[in-house]
Image (spheres, helix red, strand yellow):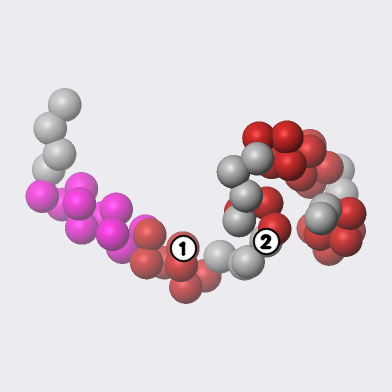
Amino acid sequence: MSIEPNDDARRKAVLAWGVASLRDLPWRRTRDPWSILVSETMLQQTQVARVIDRLP
């Protein structure tokens, strides 16, 4: 699989958008699989603000 020249530019554009647009959420700052799993499971049925209050 080769990377086209436009692929690199597209990837950089998406990453730049993410840095500028995504909310700073606790589960995005950890690499702990358990915390990520718990947050993703809770977020399926719970508002983000309530999940933030429950996570360390």
Q: Is residue 16 above or below residue 56?
A: below
Return the residue at label 1: 18
Residue 30: x percent and y percent? 62, 50
Q: Amino acid at mark 1?
A: Gly
Q: Give residue 46's mark.
A: none
Question: Image height check: is 4 above or below 28?
Answer: above
Q: Tag 1, which secondary structure?
A: helix
The reply to whether residue 47 is visible in this rendering is: no
Disc count in the image? 2
Q: Where on the picture, by quarter, is residue 3? A: top left
In front here: 25 or 33? 33
Task: Pinpoint residue 9: horizontal percent, then vertical percent.
Answer: 20, 58
**Does residue 16 appear to the left or right of 40 in the view shown?**
left
What kind of residue is marked 2? Leu
**Quadrant showing the C terminus:** bottom right
Q: Please indicate whether residue 13 sits to the left or right of residue 22 in the image.
A: left
Q: Residue at x 47, y 73 (%)?
A: 20
Q: Please name the residue shown 46% across and 67% down the image.
A: 19
**Quick check: is 9 in the magenta stretch?**
yes
Q: Which residues lie in the magenta part?
A: 5-14
Q: Which mark is residue 25?
A: 2
Q: Residue at x 29, y 53 (%)?
A: 11
